[in-house]
Image (tube, helix red, strand yellow):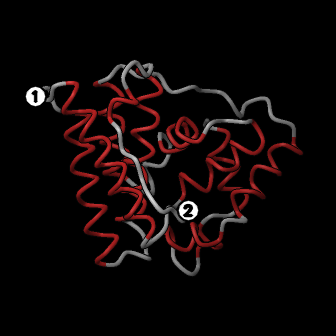
Amino acid sequence: TPFDQVVLDPDLTVGVPRNQWFYTGMDCFIHCVESLNGTFLNEFSKSYGEKAYDLCKEIFLSENLTEVESRGKLMMASWHGGMSIAYSQVGIAHAMSYGLGYVLGTKHGIGNCIVFDHLGEYYPEGVRLFKEMKAYHNIEIPKGICGNLSEYQMNTMIDIALSLVPLWENALGDDWQTIMTRDKLRELYLKM
């Protein structure tokens, strides 16, 4: 999104419910994982992504931060994570999350968490850390949200996800369509 000015005010996060804080923060973490593991990675995206990734690990796994320090670091992680994808691209979690959002109205942050929880095959270290952060903060990720979809809804969700070609190219390379088939996407969605 083009902008003239960015306001990063950590005080705006005071009183945010714990789950919302986690889901939003994990969107930043997932940006970093997808950017740093993507085929579009370059030195600009790498430098921003590594900084945000390290900040996220500190924010979500450290016992030594005060709430004020944590909020400030989250603003910086958000900035760096956003800059990382500005120079590269996101990947599988975001593509699939957009499908959830379109069909089910799932909000972006929680949608990314729902999807990312099942992507260990593609992002093993990132998903391992995500699960550790989730356990550390005692966060429950919704389950079974795709269990009762109609065939039309499932196909729409798959169509939306597959339409995001640059995300798949970043995640899986030029031959992504041979890796992420409709059947594979359906199998992943049915786990959620």
Callout 2 environment at 10 Å: few (<14), some (14 to 19), or many (20+)? few
- The residue where tag 2 is placed is 1
Q: Residue at x 80, y 45 (%)?
A: 154
Residue 99: x and y, percent? 70, 49
Residue 171: x and y, percent? 49, 67
Q: Secondary structure at mark 1?
A: loop
Query: Is residue 56 placed above or below 168 in the rendered structure?
Result: above
Q: Quadrant of residue 17?
A: top left
**Which quarter of the rendered picture does the N terminus lie within?**
bottom right
* Foreground label between 1 and 2: 2
In this view of the protein, which residue sits in the foreground, 17 or 58?
A: 17
In this view of the protein, which residue sits in the foreground, 119 or 130?
A: 130
Q: Quadrant of residue 111?
A: top right
**Which quarter of the rendered picture does the C terminus lie within?**
top right
Left of 187 or right of it: where is 53?
left
Q: Quadrant of residue 16?
A: top left
In this view of the protein, which residue sits in the foreground, 150 or 31?
A: 31
Residue 58: x and y, percent? 19, 40
Q: Residue at x 65, y 56 (%)?
A: 184
Left of 116 or right of it: where is 104?
right
Q: Residue at x 40, y 18 (%)?
A: 15
> Which is more N-terminal, label 2 or label 1?
2
Left of 180 or right of it: where is 123?
left
**Marks 1 and 2: CB-CB under 8 Å?**
no
Q: Secondary structure at mark 2?
A: loop
- The residue where tag 1 is placed is 64
Task: Work out how far the residue at label 1 is from the one at label 2, CA to CA, in angstroms.
Answer: 34 Å
Q: Give amino acid for label 2.
A: Thr
Query: Is residue 99 placed above or below 85 in the rendered structure?
Result: above
Residue 18: x and y, percent? 40, 21
Callout 1 environment at 10 Å: few (<14), some (14 to 19), or many (20+)? few
